């Protein structure tokens, strides 16, 4: 049996249309397998600060090419706020659920 589900958790129009199958097992249980039909985009916002000290940059600062940079920013704080867009490709997110009990 092929099934299509429209799922919009927040009601904002952003949804993951999955497709999949329902398998009826010999012992009476059901197995549902789903995969995403479209790529899923996830925006992640990272906030924080990075403290730069001689102890956490020793490998970089020991390199002659970067010594000037370490002198300029040693004992400083760098703003690490950034946004990252993650993408789960089509049919790469899989959900497989087997009901633990038989259906009556």
Image (spheres, grey):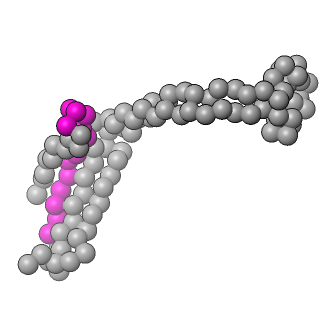
From what the image shows, is residue 98 above or below residue 42?
below
Task: Kindly tell me whether residue 88 is visible in this rendering.
Answer: yes
Q: Is residue 74 magenta?
A: no
Task: Please name whichever residue, 26 or 47, is drawn nearer the observer in this view of the structure.
Answer: 47
Horizontal side of 51 relative to 103 (left or right) equals right
- Displayed quadrant of residue 79: top right
Task: Please name whichever residue, 59 or 9, is drawn nearer the observer in this view of the structure.
Answer: 9
Q: Residue at x 24, y 40 (%)?
A: 10
Horizontal side of 26 relative to 81 (left or right) equals left
From what the image shows, is residue 23 above or below residue 101?
above
Q: Residue at x 54, y 34 (%)?
A: 46
Q: Residue at x 20, y 77 (%)?
A: 101
State how many labels appear. 0
Residue closest to the far left:
104
User: How far from the left and from the top, in percent, is residue 57?
Assistant: 82, 35
- Displayed quadrant of residue 13: top left
User: How far from the left and from the top, in percent, is residue 9?
Assistant: 23, 43
Q: Is residue 19 magenta?
A: yes
Q: Give, as a single range, the part of the protein colored magenta.
A: 11-24
Quarter of the image containing the C terminus? bottom left
Q: Residue at x 31, y 43 (%)?
A: 91
User: How far from the left and from the top, in percent, is residue 102?
Assistant: 16, 78
User: How far from the left and from the top, in percent, is residue 21?
Assistant: 18, 56
Quarter of the image containing the N terminus? bottom left
From what the image shows, is residue 46 above or below residue 92?
above
From what the image shows, is residue 102 above or below residue 58?
below
Horizontal side of 104 relative to 36 (left or right) equals left
């Amino acid at each position: 049996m092929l099934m299509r589900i429209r799922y919009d958790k927040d009601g904002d129009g952003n949804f993951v249309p999955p497709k999949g199958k329902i398998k009826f097992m010999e012992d009476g249980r059901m197995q549902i397998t789903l995969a995403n039909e479209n790529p899923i985009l996830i925006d992640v916002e990272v906030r924080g600060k990075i403290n730069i000290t001689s102890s956490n940059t020793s490998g970089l600062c020991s390199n002659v090419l970067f010594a000037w940079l370490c002198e300029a920013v040693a004992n400083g704080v760098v703003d690490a706020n950034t946004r990252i867009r993650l993408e789960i490709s089509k049919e790469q997110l899989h959900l497989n659920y087997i009901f633990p009990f038989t259906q009556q």
